Image (spheres, grey):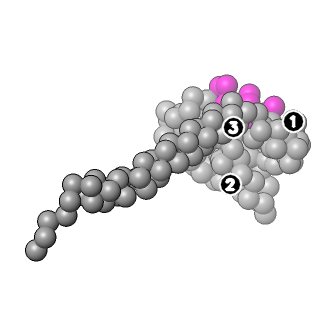
Amino acid sequence: MKRPSRIAAVAGFLGLLAPAVFVASEVRDSLAASHRRLQRFSRRGTDLYGRALARHRGAEYVARLQGITRVLAPQEPYLILESTPDDFDSYFVRFDLAPRPAVWLGRLGESPEDLLGRLASLEPGIHWVIVASLRPPGPELLSREQAAEDLRSTR
């Protein structure tokens, strides 16, 4: 068998190398463009979410959420109390307050005695109760003691 000439070997090598160089340069340019778009978006990302949320839920709702997030640390748990017996506002409020963990307390439509009993039996290290509501003015942040006092006054 005849061995290929050096010119043929170099040409074959260049034939393999050229597409690899082309792909590498295109990937590099594409990644650089994607990186620039991500940087632009990340600078405005929170603002876009806040504006969309305000447009959808209202400025009062967003103001209440911002107040709550200033009080609760990102990993601090809270008790969540559904404001109405038939709605599922707590799911949306929990999503908007993520990553803070929520512990279900109940619904305001339940008997105050049941809610007070549950409040007393839950982890004492949780200091805040959020009354979840999508209706204006939005969710309400209460201290655990204030929530217990409010429940006692509704008996």
Q: So how many labels did they put on this image?
A: 3
Up/down of 19 relative to 101, above or below: below
Q: Secondary structure at mark 1?
A: helix
Point out the stretch of residues depicted in magenta.
63-71
The type of residue carrying mark 3 is: Phe
What residue sits right under mark 2 in the picture?
91
Q: Earlier in the sequence, mark 1 or mark 2?
A: 1
Mark 1: few/some/many CA within 10 Å (<14, 14-19, 20+):
some
Which image quadrant for residue 120?
top right
Which label was assigned to residue 45?
none
Q: Is 136 rendered above or below residue 82?
A: above
Q: Position of residue 60 (x, y in %)?
A: 87, 35
Q: Quadrant of residue 3?
A: bottom left
Which type of secondary structure does the marked residue at label 3 adopt? Answer: helix
Of the two numbered discs 3 and 1 in the rendering, the one whose residue sits closer to the viewer: 3
Compare residues 146 and 75 and report the one nearer the observer: 75
Mark nearest the camera among 2 and 3 is 3
Which residue sits at x=78%, y=63%? 86
Q: Amino acid at mark 2?
A: Tyr
Q: Residue 64 magenta-drawn?
A: yes
Spatial CA distance of label 1 from label 2 is 18 Å
Numbered label attached to residue 41 = 3
Residue holding disc 1: 60
- The Cα atoms of the two marked residues, 3 and 1, are separated by 26 Å
Measuring 66% from the left and 39% from the top, which residue is drawn there?
Answer: 37
Q: Residue furthest top?
A: 70
Q: Position of residue 148 (x, y in %)?
A: 67, 37
Residue 8 appears in the rendering: yes
Quarter of the view holding residue 29: top right
Mark 2 to mark 3 CA distance (whole Å):
27 Å
Closer to the chain start, of discs 3 and 1, is: 3
Q: Residue furthest left?
A: 1
